[in-house]
Image (tube, rainbow, N blue to C red):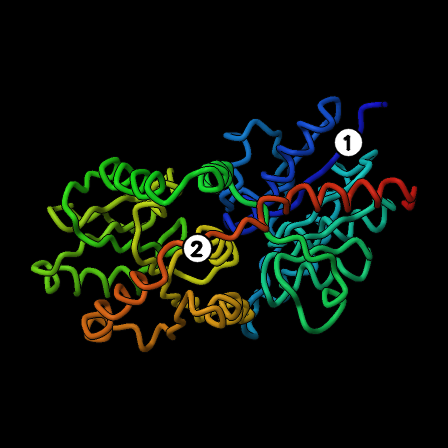
Amino acid sequence: MRSRKIVFAGGGTAGHIQPALAVARLWKKTYPADQIFFLGTSSGLETKLVPAAGFDLELITRVRIPRSLSFDLVKVPGSLRRSVGQSKNVLKDADLLFGFGGYVCAPAYLAARSLKVPIVIHEANAQPGWANRLGARYTDALAVGSPVTHGPYAQALITGLPLRDDITSLLTAHRSADENTWNELRVKAKRDLGIHSGNKVVLVFGGSQGSQAINSVIENTRKLIKERPITIVHSVGAANDLPASDDTYISFSYIEDMATAYLASDLVIARSGAITCSEVGALGKYALFIPLPIGNGEQSVNADHLVEMGRARVLEQSSFTASWLLDNIDSMLATSDQLSDLPHFGDLEAAAKIVALAEHQLSTGER
């Protein structure tokens, strides 16, 4: 088989990049002769994550769409033309484009359409983003992380969401571990984080850049619960100052080993991004989700299935205050105790299903 050129588009946040990387790794393992390229922008996390994973990254101009009427709207056509032209240069002679959403995808889809490059799209969110809605006009090879009720993605292949390697390894270990072994792994995870007490562990994070709203509530709460048997493990985000740790509060700018942090946790407090919801669901954790109050509203519905299963609560950011957390943290930990870890293994096959969809798309010979 000849070497093919496979291009991945998905950037900005880890929610778009991590699933793309998981599929790219599996594709490279299955077809080692193929050349893999990623499209991204200079302002996204892909500038760090993609090279670190060993893949080539090509940068294009980011198309910034203002959220309200402003003079910036007049800049959109010019930047879009520039970005589409740059995408065409990368997609020239490409055999396939994978799209995972984010700013980089809209020009990539337009370029692929003009060059007749087959497209495969995976949508992680329960409410598809605008770029992937655009892309759905140009391909029937659509996959979703969870069921979508309206539009073209209602007919998409439900694959689940490709997981990061550390989460996949942890789930694989869970499959072969009995309850005692799993409890021992949890105790070890707490020790690895520097927790040597029998305290309950609350894992808090707000995305790679952090959330000032969530961080502020935790800062105003942690000293008031210092006498309770609770340790907070807090990823404040790379864009924020790192508070000092103490006996019941451990801070990180960014947690690299999320598998260990999840494993140690009794309660997760986080944004309800698609990746986070998938990881919480896969590992059977109990979570309080604070949806990001901006965007197209996808975070407000991503956790619906976990709420229905009794594995999560969703609270608006405006209601998430220090007093609310003080009043409710004990009851949430009690609920977590009653549920215990109940992992779900469906997402372990997500990357393989997306690869199979792409193989079918290539086999049709449509360009």
Marks 2 and 1, the one that precedes in the sequence: 1
Front in this rendered view, residue 23 or 104: 23
Q: Does residue 168 lie above or below 297 as drawn?
A: above
User: Disc 2 on helix, strand or loop?
Assistant: loop
Residue at position x 12%, y 46% in the image: 246
Residue corresponding to mark 1? 5
| Residue shown at the point (38%, 67%) measured from the top left | 290
Residue 27 in picture, x, y percent from top left: 69, 33
Mark 2 closeness class: few <14, some 14–19, many ≥20 residues within 10 Å:
some
Q: Position of residue 328 (x, y in %)?
A: 24, 72
Residue type, numbered disc 1 = Lys
With 93 as the anchor, is 276 left or right in this view?
left
The residue nearer to you, when weighing 164 against 119, is 164
Q: Which residue is rendered at x = 55% and y = 35% of the image?
A: 50
Residue wearing tag 2: 342
Of residues 252 and 78, the one nearer the viewer is 252
Query: Mark 1 packing: few (<14 Cα in 10 Å), some, or many (20+)?
Result: some
